[in-house]
Image (cartoon, helix red, strand yellow):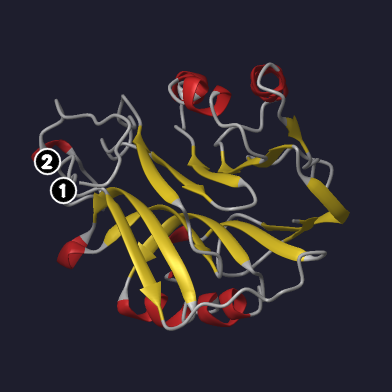
């Protein structure tokens, strides 16, 4: 059984609504795939990372925009695990933490796609479900030789801080350099400041700023990471979330 940090086992599969067909059992949350023959690019001075809530990848421009990311690692939220998505990730390792199943048993959740092989992976499932959809949110953790990554999809209510406190011990006990990134579902100044303060107690600092004069709901926090150049944020047609890209030295 793959590592699972906690699971909302009291939620019956029939309880979810909207596009959610069912919620996975505790031994069916984490999925790992090796697509093709992944190889490191060898350029450790400019390792490029993209962060994106993909909105299930069901818009017409998704395939083109996903391929144009041209990143060594993609930290994703609202990933819909389809045959086409697997094909788009040839020569990558894929880790997905399933929040729920959609029609025809298609998984959706948070994930990390990379040319680096993870040393270990873990799924965190929110202790509560969303008010809309009645399904949990997930956080995916991958430990790599150079750093550890958490892909976060936060609760759309104020429960995002409760969700983050569930992984506080895990973050505190992770000795390596850390990236915590994703859709935290909050762009309110007060809530972002609370999130910043929480992260700073763990040595993590936010490297993302506002976009078009507004706060983002998507954030990136790092600890012990050597950032190369500026963090870039730009709009897409394939999702209602922007893409965040940055380079690090590993």
Tell me, for residue 22, which label it has, or none: 1
Of label 1 and label 2, which has the lower sequence position? 2
In this view of the protein, which residue sits in the foreground, 114 or 190? 114
Percent across and percent down for residue 147 are 63, 47
Lateral position of residue 18 relative to residue 62, left or right: left
Q: Quadrant of residue 64?
A: bottom right
Q: Secondary structure at mark 2?
A: helix
Q: Which residue is at a point 79% across and 40% down the rendered structure image?
A: 207
In the picture provided, is 165 more to the left or to the right than 192? Answer: left
Residue at point 10%, 34% (across, down): 12
**Residue beneath label 2, please?**
13
Q: On the rendered structure, is 56 left or right of 28?
A: right
* Residue 158 seen by the camera: no
- Residue 101 in picture, x, y percent from top left: 22, 54
Q: Quadrant of the C terminus?
A: bottom right
The answer to which quarter of the image holds residue 83 is: bottom left
Residue at position x 29%, y 40% in the image: 133
Q: State if disc 2 and disc 1 touch (CB < 8 Å).
A: yes
Q: Position of residue 21 (x, y in %)?
A: 17, 52
């Amino acid at each position: 059984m793959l590592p699972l940090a906690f699971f909302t086992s009291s939620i019956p599969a029939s309880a979810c609504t909207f596009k959610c067909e069912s919620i996975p059992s505790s031994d069916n949350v984490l999925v790992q795939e090796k697509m093709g023959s992944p190889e490191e690019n060898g350029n450790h001075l400019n390792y490029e990372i993209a962060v994106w809530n993909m909105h299930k990848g069901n818009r017409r421009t998704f395939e083109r925009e996903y391929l144009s990311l041209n990143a060594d690692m993609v930290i994703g939220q609202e990933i819909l695990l389809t045959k086409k998505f697997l094909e788009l990730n040839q020569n990558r390792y894929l880790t997905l933490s399933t929040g729920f199943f959609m029609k025809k048993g298609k998984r959706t959740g948070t994930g990390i796609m990379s040319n680096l092989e993870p040393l270990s992976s873990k799924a965190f499932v929110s202790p509560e479900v969303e008010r809309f959809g009645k399904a949990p949110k997930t956080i995916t953790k991958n430990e790599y030789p150079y750093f550890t990554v958490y892909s976060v999809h936060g609760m759309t209510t104020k429960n995002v801080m409760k969700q983050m406190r569930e992984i506080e011990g895990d973050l505190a006990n992770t000795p390596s350099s850390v990236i915590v990134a994703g859709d935290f579902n909050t762009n309110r100044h007060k809530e972002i400041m609370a999130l910043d303060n929480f992260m700073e107690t763990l040595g993590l600092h936010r490297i993302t700023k506002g976009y078009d004069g507004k706060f983002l709901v998507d954030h990136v926090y790092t600890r012990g990471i050597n950032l190369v150049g500026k963090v870039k944020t730009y709009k897409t047609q394939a999702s209602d979330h922007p893409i965040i890209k940055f380079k690090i030295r590993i």
